[in-house]
Amino acid sequence: MSDTLQPFENFKLNKQLLEAVRDAGYTKPTPIQEQAIPLALAGHDILGIAQTGTGKTAAYVLPLLMKVKYAQGQHPRALILAPTRELVMQIAEAVVAFGKYTDLRFVSLYGGIGPKTQIEKVQAGVDIIISTPGRFLDLYKKGEIFTREIKTMVMDEADKMLDMGFLGQIKGILEVIPVKRQNLLFSATFSGKIEKLSYDFLEFPERVEIAVQATTAETIQQVKYLVPNIKTKINLLVHLLESQNFNRVIIFTKSRKNAESVFSYLERKHLGSIRVIHANKGQNTRINSMEDFKAGEVRILVATDVAARGLDVSMVSHVVNFDVPLIYEDYVHRIGRTGRAEQEGAAITFVNPAEEYHFEKIEEIIRMEVPTVQIPEEVTVTPTPFEEQQGYAREIDGQKKKENPDFKGGFHEKRTRPKPNPNKVEKKRGNKNSNAKRNRNQMKTKGKWKKG
């Protein structure tokens, strides 16, 4: 991210949104945010061409929240369409995070579950709907959604929606919402289909395009380890810290929970001065920890991406990605903290089975295949617990479904009824009028009524 990017305070966002942005740890916008937010706030239609991991969700969520501003009436005033349940839930998380200091009401709508609870939430009053096209149309046709007050509409991952055959549903939605509205369309690619859709959907749009140009410094040696589970990641991390010359190291995790777990384990190992920073740590604690790390008084800093934003430290010898970042651009930001001032640095990434998909996407962005290093023989490779295996399997199924909507899933395979065995003799069952032994519930029920 360029240092010339303006801060969020320069945008015309209210204090509630700016406070939420600060809570999320953002100090400067990404390129897509810097270009799209002012245009959206000014009321322009936008055609955004940007990959996942560029910060595009915040690029439309922040101006949308600013426009809707506060809870009002019963009916939705903004609609965000996304192709999959997973993306709807991801966008909803961003709306919750950035709208935490507002009274705005939102509802997530998607298939795969019954509509009753979703309908009840809509009926209770809603300002923003985040939905897949199919579920939105279903509830509209049932008379549960009134569209006349919708003034802003967003389509995210529009290219994927078209690939999944949602064009007919999108056209159906466009026919039932007000013509006079602001439209924001985001797509990873700009194909002929997207050009046609943008022509039909957008009015004099401003085009914002972020090319995939993520580079890593030549002075950074990058390697990855394929690690089966989190316990083995811990064992490998301890081995590397004990056996290699890590002068000053930042260990990145994807969550506060993992950051605390790694910190607690390393602290018990007495591997040198260590600190941990994440969003739950007070601001003064985070600042003091970072200052001590900069001064060289702390050898190991465990951090989440959010907490480490704005951390500018030279002379970092190693960066360890304990978890693969899900915002792919963060990988470049993470490892960019080593190998500065023409000093050589090393970036080490631990990749579990469910993270291989994400790391391949990162390799596409940085345009290189990071070498794989075998886990040293001295490191204990522990068996993966059953629950952890199941979690990985679910994630991998989701990844395959994201790439191929027709994928039915390997984790939740439908069980087929076994074919009858003609040689098997069926046991005769007693009928209701027989003297067969009653089950326990029948006996209890009869006894209860008899007693009364």
Image (cartoon, grey):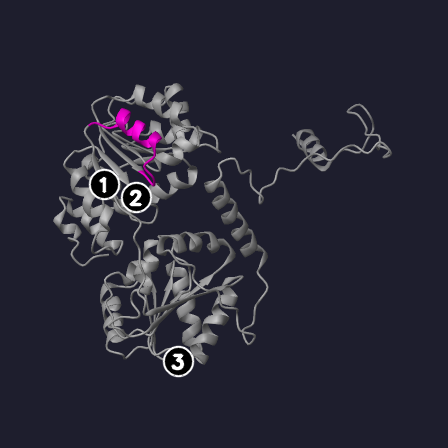
Kind of residue sitting beneath label 1:
Val
Q: Earlier in the sequence, mark 1 or mark 2?
A: 2
Q: Is residue 137 magenta?
A: no
How packed is label 2: few (under 14 Cα within 10 Å), some, or many (20 or more)?
many
Kindly indicate whether the residue at mark 2 contacts the one at mark 1 (C-beta within 8 angstroms). yes
Q: Which residue is mark 1?
A: 208
Q: Earlier in the sequence, mark 2 or mark 3?
A: 2
Pick the front one: 73 or 83: 83
Question: With respect to residue 249, does 207 lie above or below?
Answer: above
Q: Position of residue 219 (x, y in %)?
A: 32, 70
Mark 2 or 3: in front is 2
Q: Residue at x 25, y 26 (%)?
A: 150
Q: Earlier in the sequence, mark 1 or mark 3?
A: 1
Disc number placed over residue 50 in the picture, else none = 2
Kindly indicate whether the residue at mark 3 contacts the one at mark 2 (C-beta within 8 angstroms). no
Question: With respect to residue 117, does 373 lie above or below?
Answer: below
Q: Is residue 188 magenta?
A: yes
Kindly indicate whether the residue at mark 3 contacts the one at mark 1 (C-beta within 8 angstroms). no
Kind of residue sitting beneath label 3:
Asn
Question: With respect to residue 360, does 109 lie above or below?
Answer: above
Pick the front one: 163 or 433: 163
Q: Position of residue 225 (x, y in %)?
A: 48, 65
- Magenta stretch: give its range: 187-203
Pick the front one: 152 or 45: 45
| The image quarter in which residue 119 lies | top left
Q: CA distance from mark 1 to mark 2?
A: 8 Å
Disc number placed over residue 245 in the picture, else none = 3
